Image (cartoon, rainbow, N blue to C red):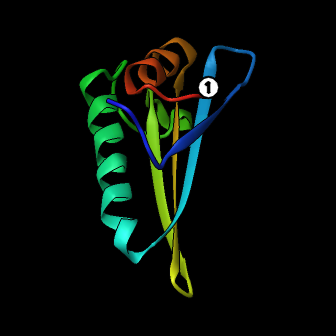
Amino acid sequence: MQLHYLIFDASDDGEGTGTWEAMASVRSPDLRAVMAEVQAVLSCAQANEPGPRGPLDDGGDWDADQQSSRSGEWTTVTLTLTGPWAWGEALMHELGSNN
């Protein structure tokens, strides 16, 4: 799968946990496509999950947070994934992301 709207930026905490953040700002005609990408990323993450999903501080192995905000005719969608570094990097590779 190739992502066209979501561009991920990766950061490593130095202890094996990574964070991958993506943001896309689009006008209404493109919002459905962005949300389809968000769902595809989440489906891929769930299909390859390293363990239970949930906040890492509460014992989860990975988690995701999706937010949307609208300003005028633009909608900004953000998606943040956290989890083991190797899992996230493999996920980004599978998604064809340029992180």
Which of the 4 image quadrants contains residue 16? Answer: top right
Task: Name the residue carrying label 1.
Answer: 18
The structure residue drawn at horizontal position 47% and vertical position 30%, both measured from the top left corner, is 59
The structure residue drawn at horizontal position 73% and vertical position 24%, both measured from the top left corner, is 13
| Vertical arrangement, residue 30 with respect to residue 8, above or below | below
| Vertical arrangement, residue 33 with respect to residue 84, above or below | below
How many residues crowd around disc 1 within 10 Å: few (fewer than 14), some, or many (20 or more)? many
Which of the 4 image quadrants contains residue 19? Answer: top right
Q: In this view, does 54 lie to the left or right of 76?
A: left
Q: How many labels does the image show?
A: 1
Q: In which quarter of the image is the N terminus?
A: top left
Q: Is residue 44 left or right of residue 60?
A: left
Image location (x, y in percent) of residue 46:
28, 31
| Vertical arrangement, residue 41 with respect to residue 70, above or below | above
| Vertical arrangement, residue 84 with respect to residue 78, above or below | above
Q: Is residue 95 left or right of residue 48?
A: right
The structure residue drawn at horizontal position 49% and vertical position 40%, both measured from the top left corner, is 55
Image location (x, y in percent) of residue 45:
34, 30
Image location (x, y in percent) of residue 89:
52, 18
Q: Quadrant of the C terminus?
A: top right
Say which element carries label 1.
strand
State the residue lying farthest toward the bottom: 72
Closest to the observer: 41 or 15? 41
Q: In this view, does 36 lie to the left or right of 66?
A: left
The structure residue drawn at horizontal position 49% and vertical position 37%, both measured from the top left corner, is 58
Question: What's the residue type where badge 1 is placed?
Answer: Gly
Closest to the observer: 12 or 35? 35
Image location (x, y in percent) of residue 62:
45, 30
